[in-house]
Image (cartoon, rainbow, N blue to C red):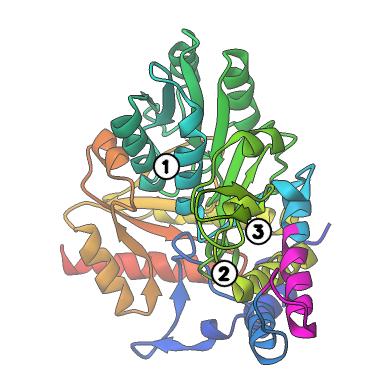
């Protein structure tokens, strides 16, 4: 297996693949620790998208000319690449969306239409708003109950409470994060799926963070739906993925109506295309698909296990170094976690932390991280968050710690 060591030539070479990392901010070398919000893009992704626009651009699925056929072949290759990436059993189970948020909304609208009044959707206290609001909207329009599984003080899913909420057999769908964007908690996906299926529920995982930090095999975790977004996976914005079991997708009504998702149209009625095209109305993300293919190929060339090991070492180093700062409190102590660390600093608002770090060239995120219910559960208004990627170095974490010491000194 490849390894990425803190001082290895490989890490320097990988960093060089990301042109944006070479710039300065406020006269200081950029230290980018906000990859959980959106990861930077390697040259391979940029080049693939430029090549598509320069040499291979046309609309897909609709043309008989050479450019359209080439564009269609490249676009559909992305579906094959993603299917292999997730170990999906059928390429037709890959539906392209704009992002994870749209993918979850698609399931809430279309699979939600198959749920019956009296059934429930079960989420958790640590969900991103993208995995809360669509289910609230479903509750309000269709009379579906919304249940919430608590988390422990360590920031882990309370599996006993999860099972208790499933026990009456009324939950139709469990929709949970695979990795928290605030706590870094990695949830036990296979165990969750086993519990859900035992009580007759389907399960959706929001993999927006998890798919970046570990290998995901949808068959091994026995999911029913899985979503992720391209821009966190070193790919472009504007493209996301919904994977769903073919039988479920086939039974679901369309989400959006328009071109390319139809079989036939008259002024009286329309019939639908087969899965996955039934869910891909209008001109799809053609250029973005090229970027997503390039991003996945780039990650696979390095090795996802190597990247995961590197990020685990970074996280351990960050937790050790941050513990040295008086008054700093790391939020969440899950046993299994990815490269996301949220924290507070006594006497300093998270927004002030982020602003003052930015003056030192260090980019972190501050706020509620689109997880207000989790903040309420933790008794917090906001946190600062540092998040790591394959290009993050131990020296950048040391720079963060030094920067936080300076911030603390200003408020002493």
Locate residue 338, reporting x and y percent.
55, 48
Determine whether label 2 and label 3 are within 8 Å by CB.
no
Image quarter (top left, top right, bottom left or bottom right) of the N terminus: bottom right
Front position in the image: 29 or 236 = 236
- How far, Cα to Cα, is label 1 from label 3? 29 Å
Q: Which residue is mark 1?
A: 131
Q: What residue is rendered at 72% in x and 85% in y? A: 56
* Residue 266 drawn above or below residue 93: below
Determine whether, in the image, residue 253 is placed left or right of residue 10.
Answer: left
Image quarter (top left, top right, bottom left or bottom right) of the C terminus: bottom left
- How far, Cα to Cα, is label 1 from label 2? 26 Å
- How far, Cα to Cα, is label 2 from label 3? 38 Å
Q: Which residue is mark 3?
A: 310
Mark found first going from the N terminus, 1 or 2: 1
Query: What secondary structure is marked by label 2?
Result: loop
Quadrant of the rendered structure where residue 243 is?
A: top right
Query: What secondary structure is marked by label 1?
Result: helix
Mark found first going from the N terminus, 2 or 3: 2
- Please state which of the two labelled residues, at mark 1 or mark 2, is closer to the viewer: 2
Front position in the image: 18 or 198 = 198
Instruction: Assess whether residue 152 is covered by the magenta stretch.
Output: no
Q: Which residue is mark 2?
A: 283
């Amino acid at each position: 297996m490849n390894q990425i060591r803190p001082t290895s030539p490989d890490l320097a070479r990988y960093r060089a693949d990301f042109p944006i990392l070479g710039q300065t901010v406020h006269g200081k070398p950029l230290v980018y620790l906000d990859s959980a919000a959106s990861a930077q893009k390697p040259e391979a992704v940029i080049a693939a998208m430029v090549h598509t626009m320069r040499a291979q651009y046309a609309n897909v699925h609709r043309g008989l000319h050479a450019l359209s056929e080439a564009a269609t072949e490249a676009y559909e290759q992305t579906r094959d690449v993603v299917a292999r990436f997730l170990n999906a059993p059928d390429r037709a189970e890959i539906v392209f969306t704009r992002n994870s948020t749209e993918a979850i909304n698609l399931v809430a609208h279309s699979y939600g239409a198959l749920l019956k009044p009296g059934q429930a959707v079960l989420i958790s206290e640590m969900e991103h708003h993208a995995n809360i609001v669509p289910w609230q909207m479903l509750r309000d329009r269709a009379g579906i109950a919304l249940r919430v599984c608590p988390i422990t003080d360590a920031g882990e899913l309370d599996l006993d409470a999860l099972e208790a909420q499933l026990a009456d057999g009324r939950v139709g769908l469990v929709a949970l994060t695979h990795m928290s964007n605030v706590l870094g908690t990695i949830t036990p996906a296979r165990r969750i799926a086993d519990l859900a299926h035992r009580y007759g529920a389907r399960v959706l995982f929001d993999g927006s963070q998890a798919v970046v930090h570990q290998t995901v095999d949808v068959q091994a975790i026995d999911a029913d739906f899985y979503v992720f977004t391209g821009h966190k996976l070193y790919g472009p914005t504007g493209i996301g993925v919904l994977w769903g079991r073919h039988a479920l997708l086939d039974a679901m009504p369309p989400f959006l109506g328009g071109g390319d998702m139809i079989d036939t149209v008259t002024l009286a009625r329309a019939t639908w295309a087969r899965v996955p095209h039934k869910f891909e109305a209008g001109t799809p993300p053609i250029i973005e698909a090229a970027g997503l293919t390039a991003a996945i190929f780039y990650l696979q060339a390095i090795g996802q296990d190597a990247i995961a090991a590197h990020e685990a070492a970074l996280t351990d180093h960050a937790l050790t170094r941050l513990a040295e700062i008086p008054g700093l409190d790391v939020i969440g102590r899950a046993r299994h976690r990815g490269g996301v660390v949220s924290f507070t600093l006594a006497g300093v608002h998270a927004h002030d932390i982020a602003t003052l770090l930015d003056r030192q060239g260090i980019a972190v995120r501050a706020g509620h991280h689109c997880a207000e219910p989790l903040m309420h559960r933790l008794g917090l208004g906001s946190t600062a968050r540092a998040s790591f990627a394959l290009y993050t170095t131990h020296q950048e974490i040391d720079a963060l710690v030094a920067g936080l010491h300076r911030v603390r000194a200003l408020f002493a």
